[in-house]
Image: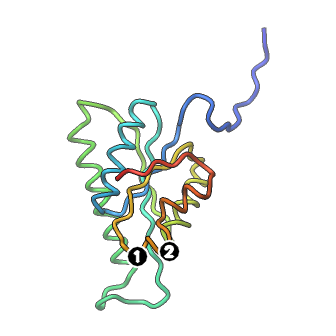
């Protein structure tokens, strides 16, 4: 009879167990979420959807607080995800959870992936022309080299 060792976290042994996907409501991020959901279903992994709420030093946009506005975006995303999963629950069952982090998208996703012990990260391709000069979140995540990163067009 062998003595069982306590379970310890080990990366990449039996396929991904936690797949983190960054969403912000853009078409690209929603395609990334759909791709990650399929991957999570096939791998029997936890799909972890992450919205990074921007933090701005100065307070208001058109008289509405930034925190309130981004909180409404997060709430809208959760409702959209719940509706989609309810509609598709008979076709496929995916375990999922939603997390909100604060900060810029890159650092927020890095923090999320580290905190949630991600085995893989999925993001949508940038839709911003300015990222050609400063680098997109996807490129920065790939260059970090800490997890396998899939960029969905």
Give the labeled residue for mark 1.
130
Q: Is residue 114 above or below residue 100?
A: above
Q: Quadrant of the N terminus?
A: top right
Element marked by disc 2: helix
Residue 30 coordinates in the image, percent (x, y) = 31, 54
Q: CA distance from mark 2 to mark 1?
A: 7 Å
Q: Is residue 9 above or below residue 5?
A: below
In depth, the one of 15 and 7 nearer the eye is 15
**Which circle marks residue 29 in the picture?**
none
Residue 99 falls in image quadrant: bottom left
In depth, the one of 134 and 90 nearer the eye is 134
Judged left or right of residue 142, residue 123 is left
Residue 127 falls in image quadrant: bottom left
Give the labeled residue for mark 2.
134
- Mark 2 Cα shell of 10 Å, populated few (<14), some (14-19), many (≥20): few
Residue 111 coordinates in the image, percent (x, y) = 58, 61
- Mark 1 Cα shell of 10 Å, populated few (<14), some (14-19), many (≥20): few
Q: Is residue 29 above or below residue 104?
A: above
* Residue drawn at x 48%, y 59% as measured from the top left: 138
Is mark 2 in CB contact (under 8 Å) with mark 1?
Answer: yes
Q: Is residue 146 above or below residue 54?
A: above
Residue 49 coordinates in the image, percent (x, y) = 42, 52
In depth, the one of 112 and 126 nearer the eye is 126
Residue 149 coordinates in the image, percent (x, y) = 51, 49
* Residue drawn at x 64%, y 38% as measured from the top left: 11
Please identify the residue farthest to the top as the structure is shown: 1
* Residue drawn at x 30%, y 62% as measured from the top left: 25
């Amino acid at each position: 009879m062998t003595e069982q060792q306590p379970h310890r976290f080990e990366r990449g042994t039996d396929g991904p167990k936690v797949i983190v996907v960054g969403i912000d409501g853009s078409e690209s991020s929603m395609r990334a979420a759909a791709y990650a959901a399929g991957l999570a279903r096939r791998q029997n992994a936890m799909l972890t959807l992450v919205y990074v709420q921007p933090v701005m030093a100065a307070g208001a946009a058109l008289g509405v607080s930034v925190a309130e506005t981004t909180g409404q975006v997060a709430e809208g995303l959760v409702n959209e995800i719940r509706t989609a999963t309810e509609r598709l629950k008979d076709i496929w069952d995916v375990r999922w959870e939603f997390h909100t982090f604060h900060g810029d998208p890159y650092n927020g996703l890095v923090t999320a992936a580290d905190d949630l012990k991600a085995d893989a990260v999925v993001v949508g391709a940038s839709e911003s022309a300015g990222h050609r000069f400063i680098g997109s979140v996807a490129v920065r995540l790939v260059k970090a080299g800490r997890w396998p990163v899939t960029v969905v067009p």
